[in-house]
Amino acid sequence: MTIGIAWVGRRKDGREHLYLATDSRTRGAYTFDSCPKILTLPRSDCALCFAGSTADAYPLMLQMANAIAAHEPARDRSLDIARVKAHLLRIFTDLIRGLKEPVIPFASGDAQFLFAGYSWLSKDYRIWTINYSPKEHAFTAREAQSFHPRLRKVAFIGDWSTRLRSAIAKDLGRSEGGALYLEPLASISAMIANASKDDTIGGAPQLIRITQHMTTRALCVRWKNQDTLFGRPLFDYENTDYWSVDPYSGKFSQPRKFGNRWREEPIEDDAEP
């Protein structure tokens, strides 16, 4: 399965960013710890994250990406993400209703999604949890509303979602201070790091960020002394345009433009990408 989270974090300077994070493990005939579970879409203001069966979820995600790419108003963001979400629900529902001779009925846990992005219409970040309803034979959406004064929007998916939600809620209850920024990344990373080889979560954390100027960017995660991208450890010779982040300290490192040049010294907040 998966552990996935989307949240709106606020920096010390008041700027807000939307983050999506998840683990990288899939299980079946073998355990694969480098599976990308977050899909950036052919428009730059939103993204999809899945939990459940890879065989069930991936075709739905790719068909949605193809639908956006095929229609210019969807591709160039003329259509607000709320309209895109409605189209997503119709596409997902139609595809599942078209399944031929299933051995067992499609169940709610077979595919679950987070769809999140910035809405130019409502001038705010929006996060939806997408679930399949066997009773309605359709996918439905539940929008994230207020969660806590220090973490105003957050949503969870996956079989470990309840544990992650409880851990973040306990941390908020035990501590005082300002709004959270990258602290949820530290929480999910600790849970992944403590998982065993037999657990349904594992691998490196994956992370993307969406900004108010409607730009979606993947971030490398520094994991076990390696830079990883969507769960895959990068080779030493690989260059990347993406910044790296330490999931525990929240410190950013400049892109590996010229091979492996991990910076140990912290970068000031105003130098964050």
Image (cartoon, rainbow, N blue to C red):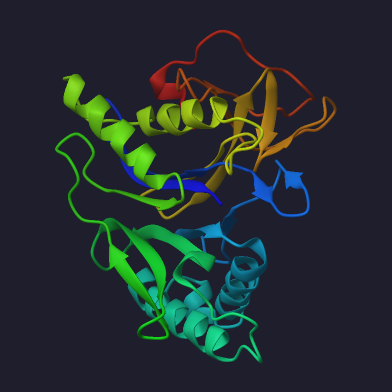
Using residue 28 as the reference point, say whether residue 98 is left or right of it. left
Q: Position of residue 74 (x, y in %)?
A: 48, 77
Q: Position of residue 273 (x, y in %)?
A: 49, 32
Using residue 76 as the reference point, say whether residue 55 is left or right of it. right
Viewer-nearest residue: 196 or 23: 196
Quadrant of the image occupied by residue 24: top right
Q: Residue at x 17, y 26 (%)?
A: 173
- Up the image or down, 252 lies above or below 228; here it is above
Q: Is residue 14 in view? A: no
Quadrant of the image occupied by residue 59: bottom right
Q: Position of residue 129 (x, y in %)?
A: 37, 62
Viewer-nearest residue: 41 or 72: 41
Viewer-nearest residue: 150 or 172: 172
Quadrant of the image occupied by residue 118: bottom left
Using residue 162 as the reference point, say whether residue 186 is left or right of it. right
- Up the image or down, 192 lies above or below 155; here it is above
Using residue 266 as the reference point, say whether residue 227 is left or right of it. right
Q: Residue at x 14, y 37 (%)?
A: 149
Viewer-nearest residue: 159 or 151: 159
